[in-house]
Image (tube, grey):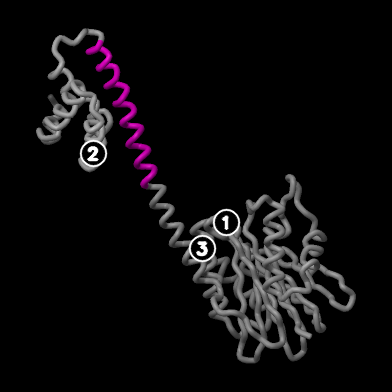
Amino acid sequence: MPIIEKYEISMYQLYKEMLTNYLRNKSEHTLYSAQQFSKEMMVKDLSPEEMVSLHISVFKEIVEDLPEEVIDSFDLLLEVMIGYGLAHREHLSLRDRQRQLESELNVAARMQQSLLPSKELKVDEVDFGVTSVPAGKMSGDYYHYIVDEQGHIGVAVADVIGKGIPAAMCMSMIKYAMDSIPEQRLQPAALLENLNRVVERNIDSDMFITMVYGSYDPKSHRFYFASAGHEPGFFYEAATNTFHDLKTKGIVLGVSPKVQYHESSLKLEPGDFVVLLSDGVTETRVNGEFIERKDVSQLIGKYKHLPAQLMAEQVFRELERMQDFQLKDDFTLLILRRNV
C-alpha cells in the first residue's frame, strides 16, 4: 500500500472504515463523512491520482477475489487520473497566478485613482464637470485640473496608448511631471514641450501619449489650448447655439525630444463652454459603426441646460446605453463653461 508511505495510517484506516460501512449499509451518514474526508484531502494536498490509488488499495483489501477485469479497470482508471491530476495541478497553478495578477491589477487601479484630482473645482467664474470611466479594471485615460495662485484654471485630458500597469506608471509620470513645472501652467504649448521631453526619456518606444492642455484666464475670459496628437474637443458658442471643433496640430508625446507645439486661444462669452474628451467618446460604436462627431456634439447640446457635471454624466449614460452598457474604450469627458 504505497499510499500509506506518504500519508498517515490513520487516513488509510479512516477511508477503509468509510468504504466498508458504505458497502454494507449505503447510509447517507457515510456519504456525509466522505465529504468531510475530501476536505482533509485538500488540507493534506492529496492529488486525484493518489486518492484513486488509496481507493484501489482499500478496495482490494476489503473485497477478496476480485475479477481480473475489475483489477484491469483499476489500472486504466489510475492512468487516467494521473493525467487528470497533472492537468488539475496546472489549473490550480494558473488560478493562483491569475489571482495574483488580479491582486496586482487592483493595486494598480487604486494607484491610478489616487493620481486623479480628488477635490472639486469650485470657482465662481466657471461651471465645471468631468466624467471618466474605464472600459476595464485599468484605464488608459488621465485627466487633470488645477487652479493656480492667480486664479487661472488649467485643465487636461490625456490618453496613454497602452493598458494595465504600464499605463498606470505612465499616468504617474505625467502627474508628477506636470506638478514639477507649475510656472508653465498658463502656457499650454510650453507645458507640452516640457512634458514631451520627460515622456520621451522615460517610456518605451512602443508607447506614446496623446494629450490636450488648456488654461482659462477668468479675467480676460480667454481659453488657451494646445494638443499633442489628441482627439479634438468642442467649443460651444451660446450666442449662435453652435459647436465648433477645437482643432490644433501637434505630434504625440514621447516620439521625439525636440517638438514645438502650436497654441491657440478663444474668448468665452457667458454661457460658452469648452469640451475636452478622449477618443472613447467619439469612437462609440453603434451596430458596429462609429458614431459621427456631430452626433456627439448634438448629444452634448441635448443636455446643455444642465450643470456641467450633470451634463457630462448624462452624455456618458446615453453613450453607454447606445453600446448596450459595454464600453469598448475608456471614456473621459471634461466640460468648462463660463458662468453668466
Q: Position of residue 331 (x, y in %)?
A: 64, 61
The residue identified by callout 1 is: 162
Q: For residue 79, what is the image quadrant?
A: top left
SS at mark 3 in the image: helix
Q: Judge the density around disc 1: few (<14), some (14-19), many (≥20) Cα neighbours within 10 Å.
A: some
Which amino acid type corresponds to the residue marked 3 in the rendered image? Ala
Which amino acid type corresponds to the residue marked 1 in the rendered image? Gly
Mark closest to the chain's N terminus, 3 or 1: 1
**Separation of marks 3 and 2 at Cα, in angstroms:** 45 Å
> 47 or 218, which is in the foreground?
47
The region drawn magenta spans 70-96
Q: Label for residue 168? A: 3
Residue 326 placement, left or right of 33:
right
Q: Residue at x 81, y 73 (%)?
A: 236
Q: Quadrant of the C terminus?
A: bottom right
- Evaluate whether residue 184 shows in this view: no
Foreground: disc 3 or disc 2? 2
SS at mark 1 in the image: loop
Q: Position of residue 225 (x, y in %)?
A: 73, 76
Helix, strand or loop for the magenta stretch, by majority: helix
Q: Judge the density around disc 3: few (<14), some (14-19), many (≥20) Cα neighbours within 10 Å.
A: many
The residue identified by callout 2 is: 36
SS at mark 2 in the image: helix
Residue 93 inside the magenta-drawn segment? yes
Q: Residue at x 23, y 33 (%)?
A: 29
